[in-house]
Image (tube, rainbow, N blue to C red):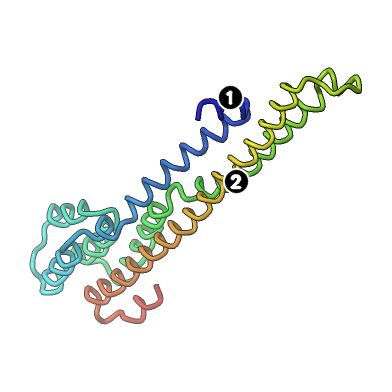
């Protein structure tokens, strides 16, 4: 592997750098977007249990709601609705706060995916840049300038730089693009699940405001 990196020349190092970043993003997002991480076991049941208690006019402490918000990355969204209801907010005010909190939650689900898409776009361009560098080394050799055959070693090195960088650029871009599409689909699925549960929770807390909840 080290010999390949030497043959590819210095343009391979930016490609290697972004490949490490891309791999880290893929691993982190795949772990973060797992259903068991977004919706831990019994977490939704606990949220609905507190919602039932609030609907029955039972006292629910802020500490209890705060503990629920620590269960997963999306439970703060559900606890926002619980807190608004416990504080006696109207359905319109609660919906406004819920929508603001939802935007923050969706940003967490999509975090780093933009960077991964950028890597998938930039990698082939960096590979093309390495190809151009390799061609410059070939045609810029002293032998090529003087019309001679040039050094075989220098020609071979220029060809290696050109081909290796093209191959590495594609090797990085194709998995990065596939991973981005898969992770984006996972994020959209988790968002849809959160929206559906939030809608049901809102209707539970504000049963007389079903039209408002549906408009969300």
- Estimate the x, y position of residue 94 in percent, counting from the top left: 30, 66
Tell me the quarter of the picture where residue 14 sits.
Answer: top right
Secondary structure under badge 2? helix
- Estimate the x, y position of residue 107 in percent, counting from the top left: 42, 53
- Estimate the x, y position of residue 70 in percent, counting from the top left: 21, 51
- The residue closer to the viewer here, 101 or 169, is 169
Which-is-in-front pick, marks 2 and 1? Answer: 1
Judged left or right of residue 137, residue 63 is left
Please give the residue where the numbered disc 1 appears in the rendered image.
6
Q: Residues within 10 Å of mark 2 (few under 14, many from 20)?
A: some
Q: Residues within 10 Å of mark 1 (few under 14, many from 20)?
A: few
Secondary structure under badge 1? helix
Lower sequence index among marks 2 and 1: 1
Judged left or right of residue 42, residue 96 is right
Q: Residue 170 bears which disc, if any?
A: 2
Rendered-image quadrant of the C terminus: bottom left
In the rendered image, the vertical position of residue 189 relative to residue 153, given as above or below: below
Residue at 45 percent of width and 59 percent of height? 182
Residue at 43 percent of width and 54 percent of height? 110
Residue at 60 percent of width and 47 percent of height? 121
């Amino acid at each position: 592997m080290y010999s390949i990196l030497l043959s590819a020349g210095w343009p391979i190092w930016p490609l290697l750098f972004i490949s490490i970043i891309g791999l880290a993003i893929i691993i982190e997002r795949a772990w973060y977007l797992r259903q068991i991480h977004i919706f831990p076991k019994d977490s939704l049941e606990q949220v609905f249990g507190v919602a039932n208690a609030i609907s029955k006019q039972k006292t629910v402490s802020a500490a209890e709601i705060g503990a629920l918000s620590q269960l997963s990355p999306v439970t703060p969204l559900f606890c926002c609705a619980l807190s608004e209801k416990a504080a006696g907010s109207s359905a319109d005010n609660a919906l406004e706060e819920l929508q603001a909190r939802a935007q923050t939650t969706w940003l967490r689900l999509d975090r780093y995916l933009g960077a991964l898409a950028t890597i998938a776009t930039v990698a082939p361009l960096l590979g093309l840049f390495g190809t151009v560098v390799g061609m410059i080394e070939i045609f810029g050799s002293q032998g090529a300038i003087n019309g001679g055959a040039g050094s075989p070693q220098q020609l071979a090195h220029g060809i290696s730089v050109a081909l290796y960088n093209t191959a590495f650029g594609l090797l990085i871009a194709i998995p990065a693009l596939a991973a981005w599409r898969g992770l984006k689909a996972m994020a959209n699925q988790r968002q849809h699940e959160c929206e559906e549960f939030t809608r049901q929770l809102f209707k539970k807390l504000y049963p007389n405001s079903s039209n408002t909840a549906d408009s969300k």
